[in-house]
Image (spheres, grey):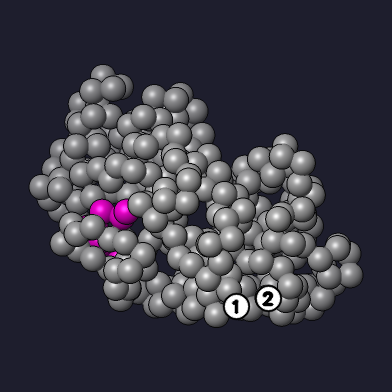
Amino acid sequence: MIDHLLIAGCGYLGEEIARLATNSGLQVTRLSKSGENGSLACDLSLPSDLTGLRSQISPPSSIMFTASSGRGGVEAYRSVFLEGTRNLSKTFPDSRLLFTSSTSVYHQTDGSLVTEESSTEPERETGEILLEAESQVLSENGTVARLAGIYGPGRSAILRSLFRGDAVIEEDGRRFLNQIHRDDASTALLHLLTCPESAGQIYNVCDSSPLHQGDCYYALAALFDLTPPPNGPKPQNRKRAWTHKRVSNEKLRGTGWEPTYPSFIDAADAIGSTL
């Protein structure tokens, strides 16, 4: 049972989770490194900050780790994800921890269907750090949620690129895109905290309709009455490694959760008006 939820990293996703949890009658404590927007200031990589936090709040029954690396590299990943989860677990050993990881830990490039049982051999060191943090959380019976690319009100790299006119359909356009609406991600994460069977488990958090990049852009161009992007080579300097896979949400849906937006196209019109 959740009665006091600590949200560690109250950014784009964490703020929506806080809103939903508060509206459900939960006590919510919000953390961010900066302490902006009414959250408590806390650097998760500093044990001293967590010790100070422990003296300010009652022990949370659950912790939602939604912190980000702030677009940082290897050292930021190690500091935020690895040291952050370790420090939270040591500070609140009786709290249930849910860690938001990423589907970027999957390395597949053959368009195959990817489940939680699929191999994870990320090309980038940042992916290896995420896996190390996952292992740390799972060893203490926490829950790992691997999130696909998050979009939502005011946020969609795909739509912004289309609207700017600089979008490119990579090669033959057959690469799969895996996404999740912010609101669906929020309900999924809160749902997992209420499921006893999710302890010690990994779940993919994505929508139900991975889309070929070309199909996605053509559908969006038709929806917004725009010219489809041209084809071009795949980018060589991506922050994340180039992958081509269909991420399955079947395990998550098996717990009773369903997305409000099964496909990115279902939400695109409403999202477009916010950009």
Please tell me how crowded label 2 is: few (under 14), some (14-19), or many (20+) other residues with Cα within 10 Å: some
How many numbered dots are placed on residues in this image?
Answer: 2
Say left or right for 53 vs 69. right
Which residue is disc 2 drawn over?
89
| Above or below 99: residue 163 | above
| Image position, residue 200 (x, y; %) | 53, 71
| Image position, residue 14 (x, y; %) | 62, 50
CA separation, marks 2 and 1? 8 Å
Please tell me how crowded label 1 is: few (under 14), some (14-19), or many (20+) other residues with Cα within 10 Å: some
Q: Earlier in the sequence, mark 2 or mark 1?
A: 2
Label 1: element kind = loop
| Above or below 87: residue 109 | above
| Above or below 84: residue 211 | above
Amino acid beneath label 1: Glu
Residue lying farthest to the top in this orientation: 225
Q: Please give the range of residues in magenta.
A: 241-248
Which residue is disc 1 drawn over?
140
Q: Are marks 2 and 1 in contact (CB under 8 Å)?
A: yes
Placement of the N terminus among the 4 image quadrants: bottom right
The image quarter containing residue 43 is bottom right
Say left or right for 46 vs 168. right
Say left or right for 36 vs 128. right
Q: What residue lies at 58% left-to-right and 74% top-to-bottom?
A: 141
* Residue mark closest to the camera, 2 vs 1: 1
Q: Is residue 79 visible?
A: no
Nearer to the camera, 79 or 177: 177
Q: Main secondary structure of the magenta part?
A: loop
| Image position, residue 257 (x, y; %) | 48, 44
Amino acid beneath label 2: Ser
Q: What residue lies at 49% left-to-right and 28% top-to-bottom?
A: 274
